[in-house]
């Protein structure tokens, strides 16, 4: 009996140590990457990857948001071989098959850009999970959306790091592609938060899903507007006073365009 008690006790003690080691390491990694700013989820399907996090919408077969931190030291010009798109095994309902995009007329648009994760091949490869892609018009994807991504990299360099939340506006009655009926958003958004100084600042963009030559500044909106459209609360971890002030602003001063 004593042997049984000691054996069972050791088993649970070992499990306790392993779980706590895992939790500590996971907390350390996610804190280092800024995951303490995760938004709320309307689907309850939050997935934490090594280099970005997301909230998956099974209904729309894509992420309703992807969140990550882009630090100055993340910026790299490494050229890696482009990997294949793969389904995200962490999504319980299974993320969409990349074949839905074949002959659809839409690009496989990254939400967390591969260009923001060139500092290691592992980080780069992770952006090719299908939970991180969305149907995007080619002219939009390679045009103003790409320009905004480049601008954010510039801000990451200038401000020594920014935190980014991005996604499509997922609403009812959107057109779809593929046999899994992946929704095609009519608008996309990006929210950029700089908390590296004594005066934190935030800027948000809401851009129609089409080719445009309109200046980027024209698409700046308050974060509050995106919250109304999505039902997502983006910065719950901030103090209410700070959150309310930053999310109500559509000012562009302080951001180098």
Image: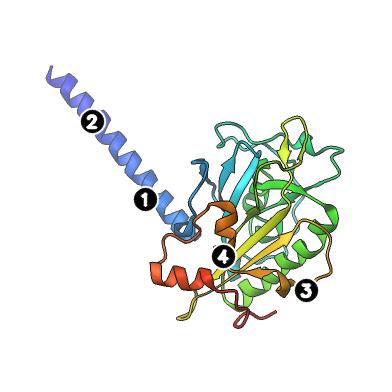
Disc 2 from disc 4: Cα separation: 51 Å
Q: Residue at x 34, y 39 (%)?
A: 18
Disc 1 from disc 3: Cα separation: 45 Å
Residue sitting at the far top: 1
Disc 3 from disc 4: Cα separation: 19 Å
Neighbor class of circle 1 (other Cα within 10 Å; few <14, some 14-19, many 20+) is: few
Residue 182 image position (x, y, % from top left): 72, 38
Residue picked out by circle 4: 223
Q: Earlier in the sequence, mark 3 or mark 4?
A: 3
Residue 42 image position (x, y, % from top left): 52, 45
Residue picked out by circle 2: 10
Residue picked out by circle 3: 215
Neighbor class of circle 2 (other Cα within 10 Å; few <14, some 14-19, many 20+) is: few
Q: Are marks 1 and 4 in contact (CB under 8 Å)?
A: no
* Quadrant assignment, res 101: top right
Say which of marks 2 and 4 sits in front.
4
**Residue situated in front as seen by the camera: 65 or 17:** 65
User: In what element is the residue under mark 4?
Assistant: helix
Q: Are marks 1 and 3 in contact (CB under 8 Å)?
A: no
Residue sitting at the far left: 2
Q: Residue at x 60, y 55 (%)?
A: 229
Say which of marks 1 and 3 sits in front.
3
């Amino acid at each position: 009996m004593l042997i049984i008690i000691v054996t069972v006790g050791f088993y649970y003690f070992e499990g306790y140590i392993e779980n706590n080691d895992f939790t500590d390491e996971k907390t350390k990694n996610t804190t280092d990457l800024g995951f303490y700013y995760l938004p709320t989820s309307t689907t309850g399907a939050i997935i934490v990857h090594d280099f970005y996090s997301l909230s998956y919408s099974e209904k729309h077969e894509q992420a309703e948001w992807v969140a990550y931190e882009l630090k100055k030291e993340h910026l790299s010009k490494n050229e890696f071989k482009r990997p294949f798109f793969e389904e995200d095994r962490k999504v319980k309902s299974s993320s969409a098959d990349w074949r839905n995009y074949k002959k659809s007329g839409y690009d496989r648009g990254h939400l967390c850009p591969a260009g923001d994760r060139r500092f290691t091949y592992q980080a780069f490869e992770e952006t090719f999970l299908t939970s991180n892609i969305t149907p995007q018009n080619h002219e939009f994807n390679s045009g103003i959306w790409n320009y905004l991504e480049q601008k954010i990299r510039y801000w990451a360099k200038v401000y020594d790091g920014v935190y980014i939340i991005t996604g499509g506006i997922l609403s009812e009655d959107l057109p779809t592609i593929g046999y899994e009926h992946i929704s095609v958003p009519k608008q996309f958004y990006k929210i950029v938060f700089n908390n590296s100084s004594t005066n934190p600042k935030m800027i948000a963009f809401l851009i129609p899903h089409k080719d445009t030559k309109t200046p980027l500044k024209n698409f700046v909106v308050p974060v509050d507007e995106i919250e109304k459209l999505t039902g997502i609360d983006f910065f719950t971890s901030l103090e209410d006073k700070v959150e309310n002030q930053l999310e109500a602003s559509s000012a562009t001063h302080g951001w180098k365009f």
